[in-house]
Amino acid sequence: MMKKRLCMILACLILGLTACGQEEQTVSGGDPVFSAGGVEIVIHADAAPILEALGEPTSYSETPSCAGEGMDKTYGYGSFYLLTGLGEDGEVVSRLWLADDTVATPEGIRIGSDEEQVEAAYPDAACCEDGSCSTYWIDGATASLAVVLEDGKVTAIEYSAAGQTSCD
Amino acid sequence: MKKLRAFFCAVVILGLLQALLVPKYTGNVREGNLIREYYDNAGGNDVIFIGDCEVYENFSPITLWQEYGIPSYIRGSPQQTVWQSYYLLEETLRYETPKVVVFNVFALKYDTVESTGDQSRREAYNRITLDGMRWSGSKWGAIQASLTQEERQWGGALTYVFPILRYHDRWSELTWKDVRYLFKRETVSDCGYLMQTGVEPMTDPFPSPPLTKRTLGDNSWRYLDKMVQLCRDKGVQLVLVKSPGLYPAWWPEWDQQVADYARERELLYINMIPAQEEIGIDWSTDTYDAGLHLNVSGAEKAASWFGRILRDQCGLPDRRSDPQVCARWEEKTARYEARKGLLLEQGDS
């Protein structure tokens, strides 16, 4: 009798544990978006349809992730680079950065824009470093946009996962 | 009495199930065994390396022994964060008091759990480091510091206490290896060094994302401060090192901050990137992944160069005249050479 009860308890426990899966990660609204070639690119998005829409990259390189789980792939499109990694459900966009001033964010900021333009385009941006603001952070729920300035001009623009900013 | 026996049986059965279901890291991700392998090698080390893949792939402790008679061990794991390094150091110093601790500073770029990138991958890296630690206050501290936001929301800390809660759905992935390595796993490292014998030359430099954070974060500094204090309390010399590598970038702005920090606290900081030519690293032969990490040939060169610093600037003695230490390290050296021969042979065939 005791053995039966024990077996039943264990079976219930294992079935119960097996039933509880982890939540699927989805792309959240409100995240910064980059647009190129008629396709909207958001960090954490499934990479396959984006890569297909963007067409053949002008450069490509891949590096193994630290513990050999998948590859980090960098696709170059001349004016911007797209970095993808292995997510829970396959290849996802993990970073995107602009390489020259021929492309701009949907809000009109490009490499070479000045600080006033950045503040006008992103009035809610956080400025995390001491003294003059050298990086403006535009945070969404799961992704961030960093606009880096030097001598009052934008020198770099990067989209990445949220949590890069140290102003928390 | 019967109830007690039933309870005991349930605990044993659940324990066995857990041992069966947890990953054994026998495939591509051998790194999952690195942290646990230390406990069989604890004690008698003059140097402990702590850090991420830039230590467990870029330094060969056997070379340090062969050329300088310095016994050492690497407590490294993939994308090991500075808070994990701190707790691993705290734990290690309970097992032994080395003369020198070498910490690879690359991890300082990650200031928060979120800043390490994709959080599902972060969780996997956490597992690789934390599941291998033996139970102690240090492990609990490391868990608390490492949880992702999602894990915090649903009480994920409990899954580190009872890993069966995390791995219960591995039923369908079980293989004969899960049974074979139920109680004892194969040793994958040589004193914490994970050997790679392949060669994949660096061709074009990887495109590097821009520098968006010029200042290393407060949380990183806080944990480094704690490491400094811990070493001072135990009379251990802390050496900061930036391992050789071409990618990901170690920015001059970060390098300067670490150099300033070290100078203010009278710590030795060695950036090996500018010394790569002097070390003799040839990126067409000494890397197995096109410039990210060194292969065994590169790791031996790096250890050979760094050993001179440990001997000359840290005053570490040559232990090769001690017969007991010597006997132990002869065994380790033989295993290392056998592994190297086997891997090279497999690579050639």
Image: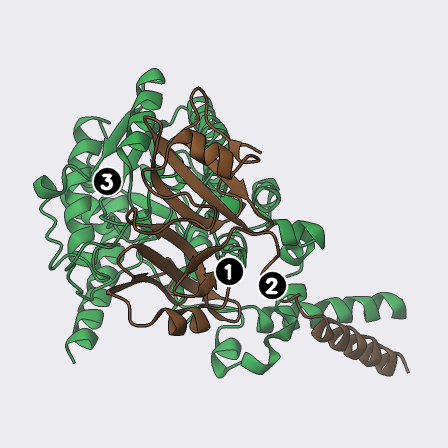
Chain colours: A brown, B green
Q: Is residue B19 above or below residue B122?
A: below
Mark identifier at residue B70: 3
The residue nearer to you, when weighing A6 against B26, is: B26
Q: Residues within 10 Å of mark 3 (few under 14, many from 20)?
A: many
Q: Image check: A64 left or right of B95?
A: left
Type of amino acid under label 3: Ile
Residue A38, picture quadrant: bottom left
Type of amino acid under label 2: Gln
Q: Which residue is label 2 attached to?
A: A25
Type of amino acid under label 1: His
Q: Are marks 2 and 1 in contact (CB under 8 Å)?
A: yes
Disc 1 chain ID = A
Mark 2 or 1, nearer chain start:
2
Q: Position of residue A29 (x, y in %)?
A: 62, 56
Specify the quadrant that holds the N terminus of chain B.
Answer: bottom right
Q: CA distance from mark 1 to mark 3?
A: 46 Å
Q: Is residue B7 above or below residue B154?
A: below
Residue at 52% from the left image edge and 71% from the top image edge: A89
Q: Secondary structure at mark 3?
A: loop
Mark identifier at residue A44: 1
Question: Closer to us: mark 1 or mark 3?
Answer: 1
Disc 2 chain ID = A
Q: CA distance from mark 2 to mark 3?
A: 48 Å
Q: Residues within 10 Å of mark 2 (few under 14, many from 20)?
A: few
Residue A74 showing in the rendered view: yes
Q: Position of residue A7 (x, y in %)?
A: 80, 80
